[in-house]
Image (cartoon, grey):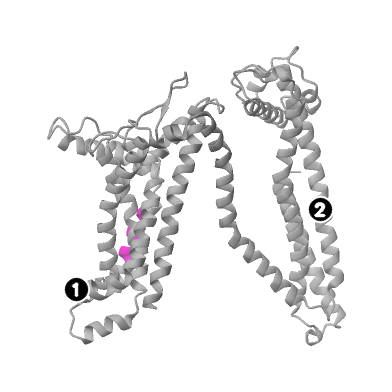
Amino acid sequence: MPTLWLVLIVVALGVIGFVLGRLKALASADGDNRKLHSLPSYYGSNVAMKTIAPAMGVLVVWLLVQPFVVNSTVSDLLPDRAVSADTTLGLVMSDVRRVADGLDTAVSVGLISADEADDMRTEFTNVRERLGQAGVALGSEVSSEVMSAAQRYRSMSRVGNLAMTVVVLLVALGFCGWGVMQSNMDYRARNVVEKGMLGLLVTAASLAILTTVGIVLSLISNTIQFFQRYPATDFFFGLTWSPSFGGGSQLGILPLLWGTLYISLIALLVAVPIGLFAAIYLSEYAGPKLRAVAKPLLEVLAGIPTIVYGLFALLTVGPMLQSVFGDGGFGWMQAGTAVMTAGLVMGIMLIPFVSSLSDDIINSVPQSMRDGSYGLGATQSETVRHVILPAALPGIVGAILLAASRAIGETMIVVLGAGAAARLSLNPFDAMTTVTAKIVSQLTGDADFSSPEALVAFALGMTLFVITLGLNVFALYIVRKYREQYE
């Protein structure tokens, strides 16, 4: 059964449990609400919560564990000859999953039957051509070992999905029956439901931490493998970035960090003054009608996809800068892709980010501070300079640091607007690249994930993660430490 249908069935059982729990509670009180400990809706919510929550928990855990169990079992069945010197177990298992998914697709479109998929042999059937008829593209011929493993993968997945469906439904029905049995007029349903909602809120609040932990765990193992194959000192202090999948690579991160920080600096020089001045105007000078129109229009920029900004940099800003600073002007710019191109467009993208945060921070300054300044005879501009901005400065600094972390992690604008050259240069009209752009390039194509040239992407990602996380933590520290002075 598809997972979506299973979720819908569990939710339907929860709705049925809500109705049954409510009716049974009312029946135990002879229809008199006043005899119930809690409102009737609490009894229904108690049953619905006990029906849905445990079943969904089992479903989530099953969906997380089953792929690991199936992959581990199938990989143990692969013979040693299936993994050669040019491939790794991970690549072989990727082929196994691709063939298994292709067989499922061929069965679903009616090209072959389920029995044919289970009995298909590479000695008698061109599997690649047969699956190609179902719209499944395979990069190479399917070996007999991969085919057998794919069939075993399908079989175990089917059994696992069937067992998951049965277990989840049994859990839902069992807890639903238990909840209905508890529904009597003396049962403290309200207390149970409120504790359940508290648990739900705690779980939701923990997702951000769990996400951070998951990101770190997904990067750290491959990062360790990279440093086992490539010296950490050469990576962190190397001045040359020259990957070569044939060997002899130089993977120094400093040129990439320089390009990242250079482009981010230009972006902040564009975004911070414009965004801050816009925030001051909207919060202190603009009337309510103008503010109601201008603020949403300014924030529309935040909703534009970054690929659109990248195209804007490539097709508009780059050629415009080259016409002024290139061969037709000062002769400083060789092509439209340059640090200045990406920095200007990224700065435009960050304007609503800085403006919106700064506007909220300035508006949070107490009105009494403004009134006191005006009462002492200060003008509006003097009040802004000497009272409002100093009071809001910690929050504004935090907003700028958050914008900086957003700029450091940008990819598409850099790929299309800054070029691909990894170099150490002070000329803002030179083409450069960043850490994020090289992560994309190193993981694009058929990369061998046992080589340093592919694993370096994870080391780059880990480095970038640490930098942006540090900026975010520092920004939150500044905001929380100094905001209390003005409350």
Q: Position of residue 314 (x, y in %)?
A: 30, 36
Relative vertical location of residue 473 with respect to residue 237 in this rendering, above or below: below
Indicate left or right for 40 with 356 as reference: right
Residue stretch rendered in magenta on the structure: 293-301
The mark that comes first in sequence, 1 or 2, is 2
Q: Which mark is residue 381?
A: 1
Q: Considering the numbered disc 1 on the image, is that residue within a helix, a strand or a loop?
A: helix
Relative vertical location of residue 445 with respect to residue 429 in this rendering, above or below: above
The residue at 78%/83% (across/down) is: 37
- Could you tell me what secondary structure mostly forms the magenta stretch? helix
Tell me the distance, in whole angstroms, between the alpha carbons under discs 1 and 2. Answer: 67 Å
Residue sitting at the far top: 123
What amino acid type should be assigned to the residue bearing mark 1? Ser
Residue where numbered disc 2 is placed:
169
Relative vertical location of residue 121 with respect to residue 1 in this rendering, above or below: above
The residue at 76%/17% (across/down) is: 121
- Estimate how packed mark 2 is, as few (under 14), some (14 to 19) or many (20 or more) residues with alpha carbons within 10 Å: many
